[in-house]
Amino acid sequence: MRLNVGRIGRAHGILGEATIEVRTDEPERRFAVGAEVLTEDGKLTISSARVHNGILLLGFEGINTRNDIEKLRNTLLYADVDINESGEDEDDYHVQQLIGLRAELEDGSEFGVVTDVLNLPAQDCLVIKTKSGEVLIPFVRQLVPIVDLAGKRVVVIPPVMS
């Protein structure tokens, strides 16, 4: 599956490097020197990668000037990813694996459907469409004790509203 892993930002310096808006949990793997990233118009090979003041800077083969990289500003970067490949941890999931799963309560009753996953600073949140509207549930084991991809369901413990 083709996943968006980043976006080229503004040029940095005069040698064709650009800032990168990282959209992956694995930047060291996706943006390693020699790795290829896909764009809408083809592919780019990464020739340099470094972090400067907390911002990822990438250089690409064949792009050697500020003007060249500036032409690629806002270009989305993609990687072909096997979303069924197991991650480093047993609790690693791709967003695409979670969207569409049935959300059930602990007693097995229907709660809703996962429609999105928000990547927030504290933790990810499942967006669940219920009959009464959207509910956000922090994606932590205490509130989402079961993720059953084969059964296409998650078990959730929604927060108590007072």
Image (cartoon, grey):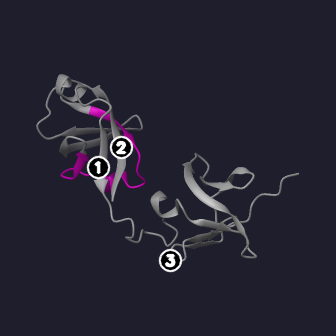
Quadrant containing the N terminus in the rendered view = bottom left
Q: In this view, does 91 lie to the left or right of 146?
A: left
Q: Which of marks 2 and 3 is nearer the N terminus?
A: 2
Q: Residue under label 1, please give it.
A: 31
Q: In whole angstroms, how far apart are the C-alphas of marks 2 and 3?
A: 29 Å
Local SS, label 2: strand
Foreground residue, 83 or 70?
Answer: 83
The label number, if any, that marks residue 150 in the structure image? 3
- Which is more N-terminal, label 1 or label 2? 2
Identity of the residue furthest to the left in this view: 62
Q: Residue furthest front?
A: 131
Q: Residue at x 31, y 56 (%)?
A: 29
In the rendered structure, which disc, 1 or 3, sits on the residue that comes first in sequence? Answer: 1
Closer to us: mark 2 or mark 3?
3
Mark 2 Cα shell of 10 Å, populated few (<14), some (14-19), many (≥20): many
- Front residue of 55/95: it is 95
Residue 122 lies, in percent from the top left, at: 62, 49
Q: Is residue 16 above or below residue 115?
A: above
Q: What kind of residue is marked 2?
A: Gly
- Locate residue 137, reporting x and y percent: 68, 56
Numbered range of the magenta stretch: 18-38
Q: Distance between the residues labelled 2 and 1?
A: 9 Å
Q: Residue 100 at what x, y percent from top left?
A: 54, 61
Point 75% across, 52% down: residue: 132
